[in-house]
Image (tube, rainbow, N blue to C red):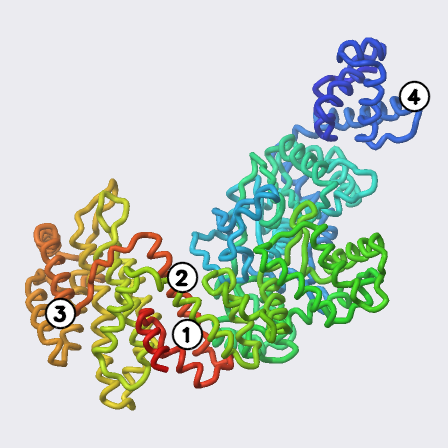
Amino acid sequence: MSMPRDFLIEMARKYALSPEQEDAFVIWFSSSNKTELEIATKLHITNSALTTRMSHVYKKFSINGKGPGKYGRLLNFLTAEYRKCKASDSPTSNLSENELNDLVQEVRQNCSEMIQYQCGTMRSLTMPQPIDVSDLYTNVNILEKITSHRRREIDELLQDCNPENFDRFGLGRVTDKRIPGLKAVEKYSKLMVLGKPGSGKTTFLKHLAIQCNQGNFQAHRVPIFITLKQFAETEGKPSLLEYITQIFSDCDVSAEQIAVLWKHGKTLVLLDGLDEVKVEHNRHVIKQFLYLSDKFRTNHFVMTCRIAAKDYTFEKFTEVEVADFDGKQIVTFARKWFQAKESAKSEEFIQQLRANDRIRELATNPLLLTLLCLVFEESAKFTGLRSELYEEGVDILLRRWDETRKIEREQVYKNLSLQHKKDLLSQIALTTFQQGDYFFKQKQLEQYISDYIRNLPDAQNDPEALQLDSEAVLKSIEAQHGLLVERAQKIYSFSHLTFQEYFTAIEIVKNSETSALESLASHILDSGWREVFLLVAEQLPSADKLLQLIKPEIDALIAEDMHLQKLLNWVSQKSSAISVSHKLYAVRTFYFEIALLIDDALFSELDCGGYFFPTPDDAYALSHSIDMCFKHELAYFRNADLNPQDRKLAPVLEIYCTLPRILFDTRYLATPNYGEGHYKTQEDYSLNFHISTDINFVIDCCIYPDTKGLKATLSQLNKRLPSENKNRINQEWKDEELERVMEWWDEHGQVWFEDLKLAIIEHCNIGNDWQFNSEQYEVLAQYHEAHLFLMECFNSGFVAVSHEVREEIKETLLLPIAEIQNMNNNN
């Protein structure tokens, strides 16, 4: 019996036959009258080669054994499959829209119990029992642009890995536009949902299945939820179509009915966890769902995968990313979590979260938010240190994971105590982190484990036995605790960078009496190490030595650049001109940052015809930035309880805080329109009012003799502004008013801006054009960030620093290297 070629080609691709195997298969079963010799001759191969090819074909179709009976069994199978295809062309498939809708409702009703069983509950980490998805689910937001590195081949991942945005819990701010998850599914018929571990991908798919099953979402479709790992490991390696057909069959849905649903695009196929599929099953799984999504293209397909998984490129699928939780989502999740247990606790949880910026950042990831809820359930509070919170979370994962998951562990790992597990993970973390390895090969990881366990009591000495034990330990950590995960074929990483940083810090603290702190200090300018620094500083009994090692590393960064030293000389001179009895380092910080802000406002240019073109939003952001940068200093020097000498600085700081905003607003109005489609609006010209208001505020702050000249010049400049100084944000401009203001800024704005700039330079000794190149700006940014880290250590309240060391470092903060050397020589 011969089969149609089109059908045979379709089956060959469905079962992932190679091109050579496909050629032999198609000719063999479409040419019943040809002999083996004739087929081999047509393929230009020997009889023996043909036999070998066909043996591989039989294996792909799971036809095992020996002898000519394999041909008959495969022919019977192909005949049955062909009849199924023909059944889809039966009169039942040509239903009216109403009849199709009735069929959808019937099938959904038959499958309702199964979908509820598959997707109705969830259990994560150390939850004592499953929770209804509907009781805890928080609406997911989607980023249509992937924010971290693209998925690539594993050897490319290391090249693209950036510690600033690599899988960190909420520490990287995502500002891209978000859309609701349901909207993304409606928008794209083939959707690949990427996300970090613990970002809620599986829960999102379960929610989609439940909502579709209840007719609340895509009511014209039937949901099909598939865990790809389970499908891949199904005995007999069925096709995905057979696997799904069997699921429906268990719910009393006939093959003919499901064929009708496929044909008319009436299914919502939810494929969960591509990254969880074992490497040896990848090809089979990918071929299967690509075949299904191509053959039944009018159906909806949603698949999930971790961002760090191997790079697969699916031409027809749109890739999106699950966004971190925002404040509203965190509150919703917390209230749902505690509602069924102790509702009053939810508000206490939310209040404590709002009071702690650092812990609130952790809560942007659903997995860590779950950990926070678990920790809060046990202690009813958050500890003051992040390191202690991480420790509690890790203890939950290490100590209680096996109890809740009920997983039988490998004997070698069972003999490791909790402390041994922490020590092992700490050594792995420090070794890999020092090497800059966020991904590491399985063999190398097993070697780290082998090196550790060979020193334990009763450990195996035989290299082969040690290798087997190390592999068992690795698999146990991955399966039981999720602290190490396989990202791609034989490539591992910590499940979250936070855990790698935490364990790295533990190992450094444990060895702080050796050279560990010196080694750590050498990384102070590497922003990827910043979290490790904070965790180490928090855990040390005294951070004096660490901070004393850090400060010279920071100073050395710009010690040899005389151009950058000029800026520090200016900062020192400006600060020394003001007599204060306390917090001189804060005044230096203030002038350093203000100098860079005003330099940016006056002299920076964007690639837009040579013009710097800020917007009103830039001015608002600048104002907010100034308030946030200097809120502690301003609050201190505004304090009425200070002595008059220190309090005198407050109006001076207010002047310098306001000047950058005036410059930004003025430069915006004074810059001509440019670029197609960019024109100022009447709302923009309300800045005319804000400029005048800010100038009046600065004039009011000019209460000391040395600000007399600035006050007089600003008064004259203010009088030159258009007279329509009204707040028109919430009012309509009169046509003649708006026209006069626009004409004035077009004709006189640039001259007025230049006069304002000269006044600031002359009377404030600020506004110098430092003419730094891009590399120098980059170095200054590193220098500044490192100093902010020192300030954070001093102000945190959780880092133990002696008064002597604290004052010693503050005294030299942001000073030019020559002054620091003179101070050291005098001491």
Q: Nearer the viewer, mark 1 or mark 4?
A: 1
Rendered image: mark on residue 791: 1
- Residue under circle 4? 68
- Residue under circle 2? 782
- In the image, what residue occupies the spot 30% across and 72% down? 590
Q: Earlier in the sequence, mark 1 or mark 4?
A: 4
- Identify the image quadrant of the N terminus: top right
Q: CA distance from mark 1 to mark 2?
A: 14 Å
Amino acid type at image mark 1: Met
Q: Earlier in the sequence, mark 4 or mark 2?
A: 4
Q: CA distance from mark 1 to mark 4?
A: 81 Å
- Identify the image quadrant of the C terminus: bottom left
Amino acid type at image mark 3: His
- In the image, what residue occupies the spot 75% across and 47% down? 230
- In the image, what residue occupies the spot 62% across and 58% down? 432
Q: CA distance from mark 4 to mark 2?
A: 74 Å
Q: How many other residues sit within 10 Å of disc 3, few (<14), some (14-19) or many (≥20)?
A: some
- Residue under circle 3? 763
